Image (cartoon, helix red, strand yellow):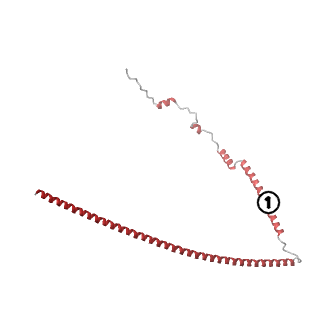
């Protein structure tokens, strides 16, 4: 059996596109965009003028707001002015009249004298009270100073006692430590002497054993020589 022919004929894509013709698209083309309706220069000027003027509704709203604010400001001004007038009238009524009659003049002079006397007596009382308070404060400060001095003396005495006690304790501790060190040295001397005496006795015992062993060897040698003869 022979092989199957799978070859495909070559087609030029450019030739195929030309044969198909222009693509039909649903959207606007460039020519449509260029041929769009455009406003004239006069229409553009009119639109710009309208934008500058703004909307009529906004202008009317601003006018109403301005009128309401003006009315409120006028009301507040009237209230403030009326309040100032009432306060000025009250002051005039409360203040005594400046011009008095001739009949009232002696009574006013007597009242002024009585007021001056009262003021002088009040001043004297204040001075006496201030002197008493100063004397009390001085005595209180002196008592405080004396108490502070007593406390300082007591504190100094306490400090001295504490220092003396500390010195005594340090001396006792030093003595105790020195006594312990002395006892330790005596024990060390005792053990050293004991060790030296033990070593001496050990050496003497070794020498004695060596002498006995040599004597036994000599006796054996003499006995062997006598047997041979």
Mark 1 residue crowding within 10 angstroms, few (<14) / some (14–19) / many (20+):
few
* Viewer-nearest residue: 179 or 220: 220
* Viewer-nearest residue: 178 or 160: 178
**Residue 67 visible within the image:** no
Residue marked by disc 1: 79
SS state under label 1: helix
* Viewer-nearest residue: 110 or 81: 110
Name the spot of residue 139 as percent of width and height, x first: 67, 78
Residue lying furthest left: 229
Quarter of the image with the N terminus is: top left
Name the spot of residue 97 as percent of width and height, x first: 84, 72
Instruction: Identify whether 114 is placed above or below 73.
Output: below
Quarter of the image with the C terminus is: bottom left
Viewed as shown, does residue 197 lie left or right of 68? left
Name the spot of residue 102 as percent of width and height, x first: 88, 77
Locate residue 38: give its quadrant: top right
* Viewer-nearest residue: 83 or 38: 83
Look at 72% across and 78% down and name the residue there: 132
Look at 66% across and 44% down and name the residue there: 43
Name the spot of residue 171 as percent of width and height, x first: 47, 73
């Amino acid at each position: 059996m022979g092989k199957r022919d799978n070859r495909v004929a070559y087609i030029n894509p450019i030739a195929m596109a030309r044969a198909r013709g222009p693509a039909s698209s649903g959207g606007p083309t460039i020519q449509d965009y260029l041929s769009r309706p455009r406003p004239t220069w006069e229409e553009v000027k009119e639109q710009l003028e309208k934008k500058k003027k703004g909307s009529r509704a906004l202008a009317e709203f601003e006018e109403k707001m301005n009128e309401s604010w003006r009315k409120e400001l006028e009301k507040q001004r009237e209230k403030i002015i009326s309040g100032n007038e009432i306060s000025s009238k009250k002051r005039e009524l409360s203040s005594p009249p400046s011009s008095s009659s001739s009949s009232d003049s002696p009574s006013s002079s007597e009242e002024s004298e009585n007021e001056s006397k009262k003021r002088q007596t009040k001043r004297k009382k204040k001075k006496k009270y201030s002197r008493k308070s100063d004397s009390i404060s001085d005595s209180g400060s002196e008592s405080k100073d004396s108490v502070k001095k007593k406390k300082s003396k007591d504190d100094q005495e306490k400090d001295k006692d504490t220092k003396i006690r500390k010195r005594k304790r340090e001396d006792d501790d030093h003595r105790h430590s020195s006594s312990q060190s002395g006892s330790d040295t005596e024990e060390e001397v005792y053990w050293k002497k004991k060790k030296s005496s033990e070593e001496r006795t050990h050496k003497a015992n070794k020498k004695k054993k060596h002498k006995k062993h040599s004597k036994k060897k000599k006796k054996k040698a003499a006995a062997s020589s006598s047997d041979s003869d």
